[in-house]
Structure formats: C-alpha cells, structure tokens
C-alpha cells in the first residue's frame, strides 16, 4: 500500500490473537506495522509477528516485485516486530541489518543472526538514493534497544511502539474518517497504560528529542499512520507520560460474596448524583488493563478489596501492583473493603499507596460482615473530593 511514492505500508492486521503479550485482551485486534522505503536502495523497517510470515512476505513482493530488500532497519526487538527477521534474511540473503549496539545480542539471541549487521550510532545517516534515513535512540520506549528512524526528505518518523495503539486498522491505514484519533483514543490509552506506562520519563525524553523535527507523518508499529491527527496523538502521549489526569474517580473493586461490590456501587451512585466523572471496574470479571487505562485517565483512585488470607483480595492487589509498577504519579487514593474476623486489606492498600507517593484522602473504610450504608459511609470521602461543593 502506497503512503507516498517512496513509502509503502507492508504491515498486517491480527484479528486472531486473544491476548496481546498473552496478557492484554485485544477484542478489536491489533496491527503489526512495517514499512518499505523504496529508492535506489530498498529499506524495510521492522518486521511483524511470527504467525503472519507468508502474508507479510507477499505484501513486500507486491510492492517491490523481484527487487531485493537491501536494508532491514531494526528499531525494536520485541518479537511482535522482530519474529520474521530470519525469514527476511532467508528471502533476501544479502540484506544488511541496520541497528544499534544494544539490539545486536538480542538479534543473535532471538533470531540466531550474527552476520552482516551494520551498527549505527545516534544521529547517523543511511543514504538510500534521493532519500536517507537517520537514527535516534529512544531507550525504554519500550525496550532498552529501542530507536526511531527519521526520513527527512519525506518528513516521516518511523516511531516504533511510540504513538501506537491496540485496534486493527481499517481500509487505508492513514488516519481518516475510518481511522480517526477519537475512535482510537480509548484503546491507545489502554495500550499506553498496559505496555508503555512504566516509562513516562523516557517517553518524555524521546518527545523532547524529537520535538524539533518537522514531522508530517508518524508511522508507528501499531495502529493508523498519523498525518491529520498528529497534534492530538502527540498531546495524548505527552499527557500520559507526564501522568497528568482529569478530575474524576476510578472505582475498582473485587468481591467474593457481593458486600464490597455493594459498597462500590453505592459510591458510584453517590458520584453519579454529585455529577462527578467516574469509572467503575469489577476486577473479578474484566482484565486489569481496563481499570489501568482509567487510572491513567482520572486523578483519584478508589480501591475496594475484601481481606483475603490476611492480605489484599488478589484481583485488587494485582491492579495496585500494576499501578505501583508503572510509577503512576499525582494521584489521590482511598481504600475500602469488607472482612469477616480481622481486617487487613485497607491498611495494606494504604501502605502501598503511601509508598507509591499517592495522597491518601482518608484512612479508608474497613467494614465487618455484610455491607450496609451505615457501616460504609462515604460521606467524608465525598466531602474531601475537592470538586464536590
Ligand atoms: Fe509492539 Fe514493544 O512491541
């Protein structure tokens, strides 16, 4: 597929995989994007996932016929983009792999390739003819070897996972009515929170490094090619990587016999009445990534967990660990939950929140046995949310 006369899309949609990284549901699929720059030399930028080798090679042949691929640019070694390197080498035996020093042992380790690898440095240029490629390191966006590739003549940034998103692409891959930012925003946020969320500081570094480039087109490894919607997409990544959030509350809970769930719904009803934006997540019936997405969206996190084995009910502990692991900043926190003979979950959640630098909005509410509104009164919490009059 032609993006320009010189830049071609040779990626694929994956609508079969249930869990991305075997962790994150992708009900709307995902795309593995790969690109050709066709000039006197032909450069292929990243590859795709292992299951799609035949279709991928056919996409390349459709664009360049019998011409060989001269360079395989390796921006990122996670196997959703690197799994077909050995097949590319088998198909095009003279192809030179172009990458940075950190990727070299990964290429050997994952693909068994050690020959004909050109190691480039920060800012180095690779001439292709009328066009050239320039390389900038972007470590930890999302692995240590990650780099991005800039084609100045086409004003195109091949950004790796940065600016990527879950959700397969429709028809023409360029952002358009069928691939617009608004229809990807939720899944882009969930992708960021799940995959890249820990690396806010390094995403900020990369954004600063790339801010001077006159970018007309962003070709990431997942989701649409961004042209029209670049300002919104860059603004979202900037905001997410600064851990900025909107006024609002994420209530996420787990419940064994329905008592903590009743408390969670009572709080949701109260927020609804007060017209406070909120999201309610039952962590026992949905993947943690949906609540995690909303942790990146709203500034207040309220967790409901019964005490279980003198600890935090495991589905809620999983979310709290995911939040702490992602170094989420600037959040306020409140915990509640039921217990039968000894309460521990609220205290332990509060300790985790304090260690993570969150601001506690109160001591939390730990209630014994069945839920009732008098045992679990959210009045103080509602009062303390600054946007409640
Ligand atoms: Fe899409 Fe970090 O790989």
Image (cartoon, rainbow, N blue to C red):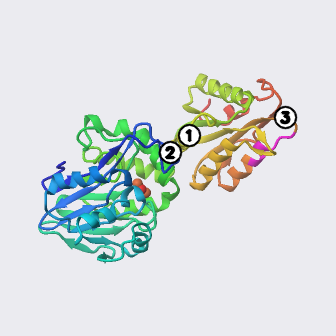
In terms of image quadrants, where is residue 7?
bottom left
In the image, residue 1 sits, relative to residue 36, either above or below, namely above
Would residue 307 be visible to someone looking at this image?
yes
Query: In x, y percent, where is residue 88?
Result: 28, 63
Q: Is residue 161 visible?
A: no
Q: In which quarter of the view is residue 119 placed?
A: bottom left
Q: Which secondary structure, mark 2?
A: strand
Q: Position of residue 118 (x, y in %)?
A: 29, 76
Specify whether 117 is left or right of 79: left
The residue that label 2 is drawn on is: 24
Q: Which residue is mark 3?
A: 340
Q: Nearer the viewer, mark 3 or mark 2?
A: 2
Residues under labels 1 and 3: Cα distance? Answer: 27 Å
User: Taking 3 as reference, is 384 above or below it?
Assistant: above
Quarter of image, ligand 1: bottom left
- Tag nearer the camera, 1 or 3: 1
| Label located before the other in sequence (3 or 2) | 2
| Horizontal arrangement in the rendering, residue 173 relative to residue 246 (left or right) | left
- Determine which residue is flagged by label 1: 287
Instruction: Determine whether the beta carbon of the residue marked 2 sits less than 8 angstroms from the nearest atom of ligand 1.
Output: no
Q: In the rendering, at what x and y percent does residue 199 appear?
A: 50, 59
* Labels 3 & 2 near each other (Cβ < 8 A): no
Q: Counting other residues with Cα less than 10 Å from the Cα at mark 2, is it few (<14), some (14-19), or many (20 or more)?
A: some
The magenta segment: 342-348
Q: Are marks 2 and 1 in contact (CB under 8 Å)?
A: yes
């Amino acid at each position: 597929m032609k993006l320009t006369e010189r830049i071609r899309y040779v990626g694929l949609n994956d609508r079969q995989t249930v869990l991305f990284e075997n962790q994150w549901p992708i009900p709307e699929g995902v795309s593995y994007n790969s690109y050709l720059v066709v000039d006197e030399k032909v450069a292929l930028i990243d590859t795709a996932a292992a299951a799609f080798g035949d279709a991928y090679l056919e996409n390349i042949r459709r664009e360049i016929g019998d011409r060989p691929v001269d360079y395989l640019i390796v921006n990122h070694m996670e196997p959703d983009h690197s799994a077909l390197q050995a097949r590319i080498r088998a198909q095009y035996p003279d192809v030179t792999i172009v990458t940075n020093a950190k990727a070299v042992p990964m290429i050997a380790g994952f693909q068994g390739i050690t020959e004909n690898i050109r190691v480039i440095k920060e800012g180095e240029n690779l001439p292709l003819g009328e066009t050239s490629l320039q390389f900038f390191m972007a470590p930890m966006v999302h692995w240590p070897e990650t780099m991005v590739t800039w084609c100045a003549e086409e004003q195109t940034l091949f950004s790796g996972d940065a600016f990527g998103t879950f959700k397969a692409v429709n028809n023409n891959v360029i952002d358009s009515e069928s691939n617009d930012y608004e229809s990807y925003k939720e899944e882009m946020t969930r992708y960021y929170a799940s995959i890249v969320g820990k690396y806010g500081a390094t995403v900020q570094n990369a954004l600063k490094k790339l801010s001077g480039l006159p970018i007309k087109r962003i070709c990431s490894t997942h989701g649409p090619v961004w042209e029209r919607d670049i300002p919104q997409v860059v603004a979202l990544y900037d905001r997410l990587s600064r851990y900025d959030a909107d006024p609002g509350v994420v209530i996420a809970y787990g419940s064994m016999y329905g008592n903590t769930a009743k408390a969670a719904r009572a709080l949701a009803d109260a927020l609804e009445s007060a017209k406070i934006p909120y999201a309610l997540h039952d962590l026992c019936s949905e993947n943690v990534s949906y609540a995690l997405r909303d942790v990146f969206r709203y500034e207040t996190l309220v967790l409901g967990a019964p005490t279980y084995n003198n600890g935090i009910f495991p589905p809620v502990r999983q979310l709290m660990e995911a939040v702490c692991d992602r170094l989420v900043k600037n959040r306020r926190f409140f915990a509640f939950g039921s217990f039968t003979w000894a309460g521990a979950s609220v205290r332990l959640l509060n300790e985790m929140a304090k260690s993570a630098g969150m601001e506690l909005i109160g001591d939390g509410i730990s209630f014994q046995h069945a839920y009732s509104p008098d045992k679990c009164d959210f009045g103080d919490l509602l009062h303390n949310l600054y946007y409640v009059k």
